[in-house]
Amino acid sequence: MEDFAARGGRLEVRSLDAKDIGGIAERFDLVVVAMPGNGFRDLFARDDANSPYDRPQRYALAGLYHGFRPVQARKVTMSIVPGYGEAITFPLLSRTGLVNALSIAARHPDELATLRALSNSVDRAGYCSALLRELERHHPSIYDLIDTARFDLQAPKDLAQAAITPAVRRPYIDLGDGTYAVALGDVHVTVEPLTGQGANVGSYSAFVLADAIAEARAFDLAFCREMERGRSARILGAARWSNAFLQPPDEARMELMVAMSRDEKLADEYYDNYNFPELQWQRIRSPETIHDWLAEQRIPIPERAALTAGE
Protein backbone atom coordinates (compact mmCIF):
# COMPACT_ATOMS: atom_id res chain seq x y z
CA MET A 1 0.00 0.00 0.00
CA GLU A 2 2.87 2.35 0.80
CA ASP A 3 4.48 1.58 -2.59
CA PHE A 4 1.16 2.26 -4.32
CA ALA A 5 0.85 5.65 -2.65
CA ALA A 6 4.51 6.49 -3.30
CA ARG A 7 3.94 5.94 -7.01
CA GLY A 8 1.08 8.40 -7.12
CA GLY A 9 -1.87 6.18 -6.23
CA ARG A 10 -4.62 7.24 -3.89
CA LEU A 11 -5.82 4.61 -1.46
CA GLU A 12 -9.42 4.92 -0.23
CA VAL A 13 -10.69 2.52 2.44
CA ARG A 14 -14.48 2.50 2.67
CA SER A 15 -17.52 0.29 2.26
CA LEU A 16 -18.77 -0.25 -1.28
CA ASP A 17 -21.46 -2.28 -2.96
CA ALA A 18 -22.60 -2.81 -6.52
CA LYS A 19 -24.79 0.28 -6.62
CA ASP A 20 -21.68 2.43 -6.19
CA ILE A 21 -20.16 1.22 -9.46
CA GLY A 22 -21.65 4.06 -11.51
CA GLY A 23 -20.08 6.74 -9.36
CA ILE A 24 -16.73 4.97 -9.50
CA ALA A 25 -16.92 4.70 -13.28
CA GLU A 26 -17.42 8.45 -13.59
CA ARG A 27 -14.05 9.06 -11.90
CA PHE A 28 -11.85 6.57 -13.74
CA ASP A 29 -11.02 5.31 -17.23
CA LEU A 30 -11.17 1.65 -16.17
CA VAL A 31 -12.71 -0.19 -13.21
CA VAL A 32 -11.30 -3.48 -11.89
CA VAL A 33 -13.65 -5.52 -9.70
CA ALA A 34 -11.93 -8.08 -7.50
CA MET A 35 -14.33 -8.30 -4.53
CA PRO A 36 -17.08 -10.90 -4.99
CA GLY A 37 -19.26 -9.71 -2.09
CA ASN A 38 -21.80 -6.89 -1.80
CA GLY A 39 -23.36 -7.73 -5.16
CA PHE A 40 -20.26 -7.10 -7.28
CA ARG A 41 -20.18 -10.69 -8.52
CA ASP A 42 -23.70 -10.31 -9.91
CA LEU A 43 -22.56 -7.57 -12.25
CA PHE A 44 -20.92 -10.22 -14.43
CA ALA A 45 -23.24 -12.80 -16.01
CA ARG A 46 -22.45 -16.51 -15.68
CA ASP A 47 -20.74 -18.25 -18.55
CA ASP A 48 -23.06 -21.25 -18.65
CA ALA A 49 -20.84 -23.21 -21.04
CA ASN A 50 -18.08 -23.26 -18.39
CA SER A 51 -20.32 -23.30 -15.29
CA PRO A 52 -21.97 -26.74 -15.11
CA TYR A 53 -22.83 -26.61 -11.38
CA ASP A 54 -25.53 -24.67 -9.53
CA ARG A 55 -24.62 -25.79 -6.00
CA PRO A 56 -21.51 -26.76 -4.02
CA GLN A 57 -19.97 -30.06 -5.06
CA ARG A 58 -17.69 -30.50 -2.04
CA TYR A 59 -17.69 -29.49 1.62
CA ALA A 60 -14.10 -28.89 2.60
CA LEU A 61 -11.81 -28.08 5.51
CA ALA A 62 -8.35 -26.75 4.75
CA GLY A 63 -5.59 -25.80 7.15
CA LEU A 64 -1.87 -25.40 7.74
CA TYR A 65 -0.31 -28.03 10.02
CA HIS A 66 2.87 -29.00 11.81
CA GLY A 67 3.72 -32.64 12.44
CA PHE A 68 4.14 -34.22 9.02
CA ARG A 69 7.14 -36.53 8.76
CA PRO A 70 10.21 -35.30 6.80
CA VAL A 71 9.48 -37.73 3.95
CA GLN A 72 6.51 -35.48 3.05
CA ALA A 73 8.57 -32.28 2.98
CA ARG A 74 8.82 -32.17 -0.83
CA LYS A 75 5.85 -34.26 -1.89
CA VAL A 76 2.23 -33.87 -2.93
CA THR A 77 0.00 -36.69 -1.69
CA MET A 78 -3.62 -37.16 -2.73
CA SER A 79 -6.13 -39.71 -1.47
CA ILE A 80 -9.38 -40.37 -3.34
CA VAL A 81 -12.27 -42.36 -1.90
CA PRO A 82 -14.86 -42.95 -4.65
CA GLY A 83 -18.31 -41.78 -3.61
CA TYR A 84 -17.01 -40.12 -0.44
CA GLY A 85 -14.41 -37.45 -1.12
CA GLU A 86 -10.75 -36.55 -1.32
CA ALA A 87 -7.82 -35.32 0.73
CA ILE A 88 -4.64 -33.66 -0.47
CA THR A 89 -1.55 -32.47 1.34
CA PHE A 90 1.49 -30.58 0.08
CA PRO A 91 4.35 -28.54 1.57
CA LEU A 92 3.86 -24.79 1.88
CA LEU A 93 6.24 -22.04 2.96
CA SER A 94 4.36 -20.06 5.61
CA ARG A 95 5.17 -17.22 7.99
CA THR A 96 6.70 -19.76 10.42
CA GLY A 97 8.61 -21.72 7.82
CA LEU A 98 7.77 -24.94 6.01
CA VAL A 99 4.44 -26.49 7.02
CA ASN A 100 1.93 -28.75 5.30
CA ALA A 101 -1.32 -27.62 3.79
CA LEU A 102 -4.02 -30.25 4.17
CA SER A 103 -7.45 -30.11 2.58
CA ILE A 104 -10.08 -32.73 3.23
CA ALA A 105 -13.33 -32.71 1.28
CA ALA A 106 -16.56 -34.69 1.29
CA ARG A 107 -19.28 -34.98 -1.33
CA HIS A 108 -22.08 -34.64 1.23
CA PRO A 109 -22.37 -31.94 3.93
CA ASP A 110 -23.12 -34.34 6.81
CA GLU A 111 -19.92 -36.36 6.32
CA LEU A 112 -17.68 -33.72 7.90
CA ALA A 113 -20.28 -32.20 10.23
CA THR A 114 -18.36 -33.09 13.41
CA LEU A 115 -15.11 -31.68 12.08
CA ARG A 116 -16.79 -28.51 10.86
CA ALA A 117 -18.37 -27.96 14.28
CA LEU A 118 -15.08 -28.57 16.09
CA SER A 119 -13.24 -26.23 13.70
CA ASN A 120 -15.22 -23.34 15.19
CA SER A 121 -14.49 -24.32 18.81
CA VAL A 122 -11.59 -23.45 21.08
CA ASP A 123 -10.84 -27.15 21.59
CA ARG A 124 -7.93 -27.34 19.16
CA ALA A 125 -6.68 -30.65 20.53
CA GLY A 126 -10.14 -32.16 20.16
CA TYR A 127 -10.35 -30.95 16.57
CA CYS A 128 -6.93 -32.38 15.66
CA SER A 129 -7.78 -35.72 17.29
CA ALA A 130 -11.04 -35.92 15.33
CA LEU A 131 -9.21 -35.03 12.13
CA LEU A 132 -6.64 -37.78 12.72
CA ARG A 133 -9.45 -40.30 13.21
CA GLU A 134 -11.03 -39.17 9.94
CA LEU A 135 -7.73 -39.52 8.09
CA GLU A 136 -7.00 -42.93 9.62
CA ARG A 137 -10.44 -44.18 8.57
CA HIS A 138 -10.75 -42.74 5.08
CA HIS A 139 -7.28 -41.53 4.01
CA PRO A 140 -4.67 -43.84 5.60
CA SER A 141 -2.03 -42.97 3.00
CA ILE A 142 -2.02 -39.41 4.41
CA TYR A 143 -2.46 -40.52 8.02
CA ASP A 144 0.74 -42.59 7.73
CA LEU A 145 2.69 -39.43 6.86
CA ILE A 146 1.88 -37.79 10.21
CA ASP A 147 3.68 -37.91 13.52
CA THR A 148 0.49 -37.92 15.56
CA ALA A 149 2.24 -36.76 18.74
CA ARG A 150 3.31 -33.51 17.02
CA PHE A 151 0.31 -32.95 14.76
CA ASP A 152 -1.23 -29.51 15.30
CA LEU A 153 -2.56 -26.50 13.48
CA GLN A 154 -0.01 -23.78 12.87
CA ALA A 155 -2.49 -21.40 14.55
CA PRO A 156 -6.27 -21.35 15.10
CA LYS A 157 -6.78 -18.83 12.31
CA ASP A 158 -4.97 -21.10 9.81
CA LEU A 159 -8.10 -23.16 9.25
CA ALA A 160 -10.92 -22.50 6.82
CA GLN A 161 -14.03 -24.30 5.72
CA ALA A 162 -15.76 -23.86 2.41
CA ALA A 163 -18.65 -25.03 0.28
CA ILE A 164 -18.04 -23.38 -3.06
CA THR A 165 -20.16 -23.40 -6.19
CA PRO A 166 -17.69 -23.28 -9.11
CA ALA A 167 -18.52 -20.70 -11.76
CA VAL A 168 -17.02 -18.70 -14.62
CA ARG A 169 -18.41 -15.24 -15.33
CA ARG A 170 -18.11 -12.73 -18.12
CA PRO A 171 -14.63 -11.19 -18.09
CA TYR A 172 -15.76 -7.57 -18.56
CA ILE A 173 -18.86 -5.39 -18.87
CA ASP A 174 -19.68 -2.02 -20.41
CA LEU A 175 -20.67 0.45 -17.68
CA GLY A 176 -21.77 3.05 -20.22
CA ASP A 177 -20.10 6.11 -21.74
CA GLY A 178 -17.23 3.95 -22.94
CA THR A 179 -16.07 2.86 -19.48
CA TYR A 180 -15.52 -0.83 -18.82
CA ALA A 181 -15.28 -2.94 -15.69
CA VAL A 182 -12.93 -5.94 -15.72
CA ALA A 183 -13.56 -8.95 -13.47
CA LEU A 184 -10.59 -10.29 -11.51
CA GLY A 185 -10.07 -13.24 -9.17
CA ASP A 186 -13.14 -14.92 -7.68
CA VAL A 187 -15.42 -12.39 -9.33
CA HIS A 188 -14.34 -13.77 -12.69
CA VAL A 189 -13.61 -17.45 -11.95
CA THR A 190 -14.52 -19.37 -8.80
CA VAL A 191 -12.88 -22.79 -8.79
CA GLU A 192 -13.27 -25.73 -6.46
CA PRO A 193 -10.20 -25.56 -4.17
CA LEU A 194 -9.30 -29.25 -4.48
CA THR A 195 -6.92 -28.57 -7.36
CA GLY A 196 -5.36 -25.56 -5.59
CA GLN A 197 -5.89 -23.18 -8.51
CA GLY A 198 -7.85 -20.28 -6.98
CA ALA A 199 -5.00 -18.05 -5.78
CA ASN A 200 -2.81 -19.15 -8.70
CA VAL A 201 -5.20 -18.05 -11.44
CA GLY A 202 -6.18 -14.92 -9.52
CA SER A 203 -2.53 -13.86 -9.22
CA TYR A 204 -1.81 -14.76 -12.84
CA SER A 205 -4.84 -12.80 -14.03
CA ALA A 206 -3.73 -9.75 -12.03
CA PHE A 207 -0.26 -9.78 -13.60
CA VAL A 208 -1.68 -10.12 -17.12
CA LEU A 209 -4.08 -7.26 -16.47
CA ALA A 210 -1.34 -5.06 -14.97
CA ASP A 211 0.88 -5.59 -18.02
CA ALA A 212 -2.03 -4.81 -20.34
CA ILE A 213 -2.82 -1.60 -18.45
CA ALA A 214 0.82 -0.49 -18.59
CA GLU A 215 0.93 -0.97 -22.36
CA ALA A 216 -2.56 0.36 -23.21
CA ARG A 217 -3.30 3.53 -25.12
CA ALA A 218 -7.03 3.34 -24.41
CA PHE A 219 -9.23 1.29 -22.11
CA ASP A 220 -11.86 0.46 -24.68
CA LEU A 221 -13.55 -2.69 -25.94
CA ALA A 222 -10.47 -3.64 -27.98
CA PHE A 223 -8.37 -3.40 -24.79
CA CYS A 224 -10.76 -5.70 -22.91
CA ARG A 225 -10.80 -8.27 -25.69
CA GLU A 226 -7.02 -8.32 -26.06
CA MET A 227 -6.50 -8.53 -22.30
CA GLU A 228 -8.89 -11.46 -22.11
CA ARG A 229 -7.13 -13.29 -24.93
CA GLY A 230 -3.94 -13.04 -22.91
CA ARG A 231 -5.34 -14.72 -19.80
CA SER A 232 -8.21 -16.96 -20.94
CA ALA A 233 -6.24 -20.13 -21.74
CA ARG A 234 -4.86 -20.51 -18.23
CA ILE A 235 -7.98 -19.35 -16.43
CA LEU A 236 -10.37 -21.53 -18.41
CA GLY A 237 -7.92 -24.42 -18.26
CA ALA A 238 -8.02 -24.24 -14.45
CA ALA A 239 -11.82 -23.98 -14.37
CA ARG A 240 -12.40 -26.88 -16.78
CA TRP A 241 -9.84 -29.11 -15.08
CA SER A 242 -11.28 -28.35 -11.63
CA ASN A 243 -14.83 -29.02 -12.84
CA ALA A 244 -13.82 -32.33 -14.40
CA PHE A 245 -11.98 -33.32 -11.22
CA LEU A 246 -15.27 -33.15 -9.29
CA GLN A 247 -16.80 -35.97 -11.33
CA PRO A 248 -16.12 -39.67 -10.75
CA PRO A 249 -13.15 -40.66 -12.90
CA ASP A 250 -13.97 -42.35 -16.16
CA GLU A 251 -12.01 -45.36 -17.38
CA ALA A 252 -9.32 -43.26 -19.08
CA ARG A 253 -8.64 -41.20 -15.97
CA MET A 254 -8.46 -44.39 -13.92
CA GLU A 255 -5.92 -45.69 -16.44
CA LEU A 256 -3.93 -42.47 -15.98
CA MET A 257 -3.95 -42.79 -12.17
CA VAL A 258 -2.82 -46.40 -12.33
CA ALA A 259 -0.07 -45.44 -14.79
CA MET A 260 1.11 -42.61 -12.51
CA SER A 261 1.30 -45.02 -9.57
CA ARG A 262 3.75 -47.09 -11.60
CA ASP A 263 5.75 -44.35 -13.35
CA GLU A 264 7.33 -41.59 -11.28
CA LYS A 265 8.20 -39.46 -14.31
CA LEU A 266 4.57 -39.38 -15.42
CA ALA A 267 3.40 -38.54 -11.91
CA ASP A 268 5.96 -35.73 -11.68
CA GLU A 269 4.76 -34.25 -14.96
CA TYR A 270 1.14 -34.41 -13.82
CA TYR A 271 1.90 -32.51 -10.61
CA ASP A 272 4.24 -30.07 -12.37
CA ASN A 273 1.23 -29.17 -14.51
CA TYR A 274 -0.47 -27.72 -11.43
CA ASN A 275 1.60 -24.67 -12.42
CA PHE A 276 0.21 -24.82 -15.97
CA PRO A 277 -3.50 -25.70 -15.82
CA GLU A 278 -3.96 -24.88 -19.49
CA LEU A 279 -1.46 -27.66 -20.33
CA GLN A 280 -3.03 -30.00 -17.79
CA TRP A 281 -6.43 -29.55 -19.38
CA GLN A 282 -5.04 -30.30 -22.82
CA ARG A 283 -3.58 -33.50 -21.40
CA ILE A 284 -6.66 -34.84 -19.58
CA ARG A 285 -9.68 -33.31 -21.33
CA SER A 286 -10.72 -36.52 -23.10
CA PRO A 287 -9.90 -40.25 -23.21
CA GLU A 288 -8.12 -39.61 -26.51
CA THR A 289 -5.79 -36.95 -25.09
CA ILE A 290 -5.03 -39.12 -22.05
CA HIS A 291 -4.14 -42.06 -24.27
CA ASP A 292 -2.01 -39.77 -26.46
CA TRP A 293 -0.14 -38.64 -23.34
CA LEU A 294 0.51 -42.20 -22.24
CA ALA A 295 1.69 -43.06 -25.74
CA GLU A 296 4.12 -40.11 -25.74
CA GLN A 297 5.62 -41.47 -22.53
CA ARG A 298 5.69 -44.98 -24.04
CA ILE A 299 3.53 -46.21 -21.19
CA PRO A 300 1.15 -49.06 -22.06
CA ILE A 301 -2.47 -48.50 -21.13
CA PRO A 302 -3.07 -50.48 -17.92
CA GLU A 303 -5.13 -53.60 -18.36
CA ARG A 304 -8.79 -53.30 -17.47
CA ALA A 305 -8.38 -55.84 -14.63
CA ALA A 306 -5.96 -53.48 -12.88
CA LEU A 307 -8.65 -50.81 -12.61
CA THR A 308 -10.91 -52.70 -10.24
CA ALA A 309 -11.47 -51.45 -6.69
CA GLY A 310 -8.63 -52.12 -4.33
CA GLU A 311 -5.87 -52.05 -6.95
Image (tube, grey):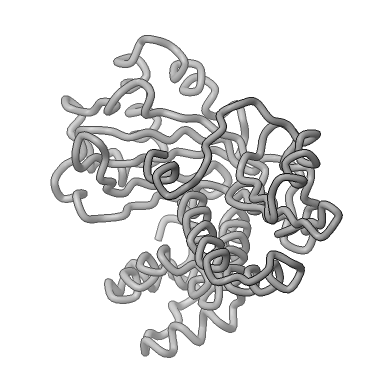
Q: Position of residue 276 (x, y in %)?
A: 45, 69
Q: Quadrant of the N terminus?
A: top left
Is 130 in front, or is 6? 6
In the picture shown, does residue 124 fall above or below 225? Answer: above
Q: Position of residue 113 (x, y in %)?
A: 54, 22
Q: Is residue 199 left or right of residue 91?
A: right
> Does residue 209 show up?
yes
Q: Number of callouts in the render? A: 0
The picture quadrant where one finds residue 87 is top left
Q: Residue at x 38, y 39 (%)?
A: 2
Q: Position of residue 210 (x, y in %)?
A: 52, 61
Q: Residue at x 66, y 74 (%)?
A: 226
Outermost left residue: 70
Outermost top residue: 122
> Does residue 253 show up?
no
Q: Residue at x 38, y 52 (%)?
A: 78
Q: Position of residue 85 (x, y in %)?
A: 52, 43
